[in-house]
Image (cartoon, grey):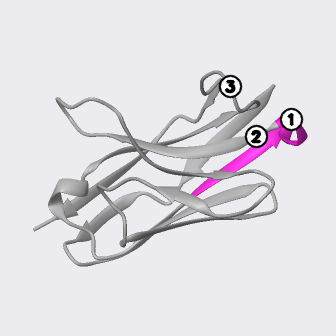
């Protein structure tokens, strides 16, 4: 089992920055990839980006490409966000999967990001 805990959300003005953290614990040596998702009220959950646990380049979805950086240090995966827009307001989740196949088995509880105009 793997446990994920997000932190770092909050209220920020448009144009501001936030860094979200996803702290992993448990059988982290089993992990293959960690992703960030977000879900805004009334909208479907969407992937923001991901990074392989072993390292390498991160993947960024078009919705936030150029404004985010995903990185990992130890057992924590970070989502650095800049130039935030009101439409970035959402609950942000990190999720992890133990294999290249299959879905994300482990999810955090989420952290709220609110961007004011």
Circle 1 — which element? helix
Which of the 4 image quadrants contains residue 105?
top right
Q: Quadrant of residue 71?
A: bottom right
- In percent of the image, x 71 and y 32: which residue is there? 100
Pointer 2 with pointer 1, Cβ within 8 A: yes
**Residues in magenta, as a range:** 21-30
Whichever of callouts 3 and 1 sits on the residue coming sooner in the sequence is 1
Placement of 22 over or under 3, stated as above or below: below
Q: Residues within 10 Å of mark 1 (few under 14, many from 20)?
A: some
Does the magenta-highlighted stretch encompass residue 17?
no
Residue denoted by label 1: 30
Q: Nearer the viewer, residue 105 or 13?
A: 105
**Viewer-nearest of discs 3 and 2:** 3
Residue at 10 percent across and 68 percent down: it is 117
Quarter holding residue 55? bottom right
Q: Residue at horizontal 87%, vertical 34%?
A: 27
Q: Does residue 40 appear to the left or right of 111 in the view shown?
A: left
Q: Is residue 101 above or below residue 66?
A: above
Q: Seen in the image, is 102 located left or right of residue 60?
A: right
The residue drawn where x is 25% and y is 39% is 40
Query: Label 3 vs label 1: CA separation?
Result: 13 Å
Residue matched to label 2: 32
> Quadrant where the N terminus lies?
top right
> Percent x, y for residue 36?
50, 47
Q: Which residue is mark 3?
A: 101
> How far apart are the two marked residues, 2 and 1, measured between alpha carbons?
7 Å
Q: Position of residue 16 (x, y in %)?
A: 29, 77
Report the Cα–Cα distance between label 3 and label 2. Answer: 10 Å
Mark earlier in primary sequence (3, 2): 2
Q: Residues within 10 Å of mark 3 (few under 14, many from 20)?
A: few
**In the image, residue 31 above or below residue 53:** above
């Amino acid at each position: 089992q793997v446990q994920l805990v997000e932190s770092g959300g909050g209220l920020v003005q448009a144009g501001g920055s936030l860094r979200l953290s996803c702290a992993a614990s448990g059988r982290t040596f089993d992990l293959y990839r960690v992703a960030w998702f977000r879900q805004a009220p009334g909208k479907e959950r969407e992937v923001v980006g991901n990074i392989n646990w072993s390292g390498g380049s991160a993947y960024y979805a078009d919705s936030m490409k150029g404004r985010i950086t995903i990185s990992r240090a130890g057992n924590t995966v970070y989502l650095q966000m800049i130039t935030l827009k009101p439409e970035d307001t959402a609950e942000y989740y990190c999720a992890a999967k133990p294999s290249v196949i299959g879905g994300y088995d482990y999810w955090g509880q989420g952290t709220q990001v609110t961007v004011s105009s």
